Amino acid sequence: MNALTEKQKMLQRQSLPLEAKIEMTKKRVREWYDHWDGDVYLSLSFGKDSFVLYDIIKSMNIEIPSVFSNTGLEMPEIVKFGREIIKNDPSIEEIRPKKHFKEVWEKEGIPLVSKKVARMVRTLQGGSEGRENTYRLYDTGINSQGVFCKNWKLPNKWRSLVSSEIKMSEKCCDYLKKEPIKTYQKRSGRQGITAMMADEGGYRGGMTTCNQYTAKNPMSSPMLFWTEADIWEYVDTKNLEICHVYYERIYDSEGELIWCATPHWKGEPEPTGYRVVFQGDDYQILELGDELHYRISGEPRTGCMFCAFGVHLDKGLNRFQRMKISHPRQHRVITERMDLGSALQLIDVKFIPEGVGDNTLFENNQMDLLGDK
């Protein structure tokens, strides 16, 4: 009988029950910890996946510090949730990038479509001088050996971006996320643990090894075989409180949170007496008296709020349409003052939900996105 391939092993592990996955994750963490003589850290974003891993590691009674890389673009609710946790756990360190996202966008360009497409567009916008081979590869698909490589030619779908006035780049992550982490690793001598899961697809979907000891950048992903359903099963069965943005919410027309479906909600009960005046795929416009409120489903992901990589693939309300309802001030900053709206129009992505008018912007309890807070 032939031995199982790594991909078959991954599929087998993904089918395990939750408790077996928890024990396997603990085993991977312990192996990583022992291999590096305890010089490891957890990359903690305070999203639901990394917070589940944080909870598992805390149950192991081993000392592993956590690092919160605050890019300045996290949802304010995530930052608030995280800082409440940090108050009670001195082993968590918050790090920040040297540059503000506004500076990075203005100098390098905006993150649009995907890292690969953004890199291609940036190269073609910059001209061929000094990089003739790369320019030809992205422009025609012909590599330095004269061989046609279809996957390295900029798809025709995105060719119009090259001649547009929109400057694009894949470097935002380098400045805001990767550099602070690399600086921390160099300073501390620690190797990272992440909550990456193959279930997320893309590059991660092709990964099959949890602990990569000999990689150029060694990394442990002890939850690689978990799925989204596992995360929610853990949250529910362990009664783990995660940030409320992952649950269904109701906002007023100014972006003020009225109610949330989290079992840990401490505010007023869900209002009654609404009349549904508009029904979208995953949101409703509600009328209560002379006021309009908006009900939206929980956030599927919570990375950098303003990142437009993959937005054209979002299902239902995309991230910027959601932002119009939940964070109208940030929505105006990014789509108007930072002109992301023009870029989204170029790739035929809507950024205002159907039926939602111009929300009144609010100033209280919001981060100063163009300042240093």
Image (cartoon, grey):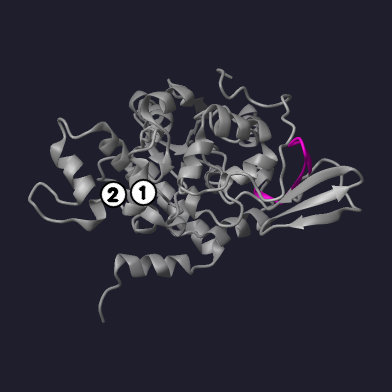
Q: Residue at x 50, y 37 (%)?
A: 342
Q: In the image, is residue 106 above or below residue 6? A: above
Tell me where the magenta segment starts and ends, as one range: 246-258
Give the distance between the C-alpha atoms of the residues marked 1 and 2, in whole angstroms: 7 Å
**Label ID, residue 158:** 1
**Label ID, residue 244:** none
Quadrant of the rendering where the N terminus is positioned: bottom left
Q: In the image, is residue 346 above or below residue 82? A: below
User: Is 155 situated left or right of 55 in this image?
Assistant: left
Amino acid, disc 2: Leu
Q: Residue furthest left?
A: 145
Q: Secondary structure at mark 1?
A: helix
Q: Residues within 10 Å of mark 2 (few under 14, many from 20)?
A: many
Q: Position of residue 362 (x, y in %)?
A: 73, 28
| Residue 171 vs residue 201, the one in the foreground | 171
User: Is 63 situated left or right of 148 in this image?
Assistant: right
**Label ID, residue 154:** 2
Amino acid, disc 1: Trp
Q: Secondary structure at mark 2?
A: loop
User: Is 174 situated left or right of 228 in this image?
Assistant: left
Query: Does the residue at mark 1 contact the one at mark 2 (Cβ under 8 Å)?
Result: yes
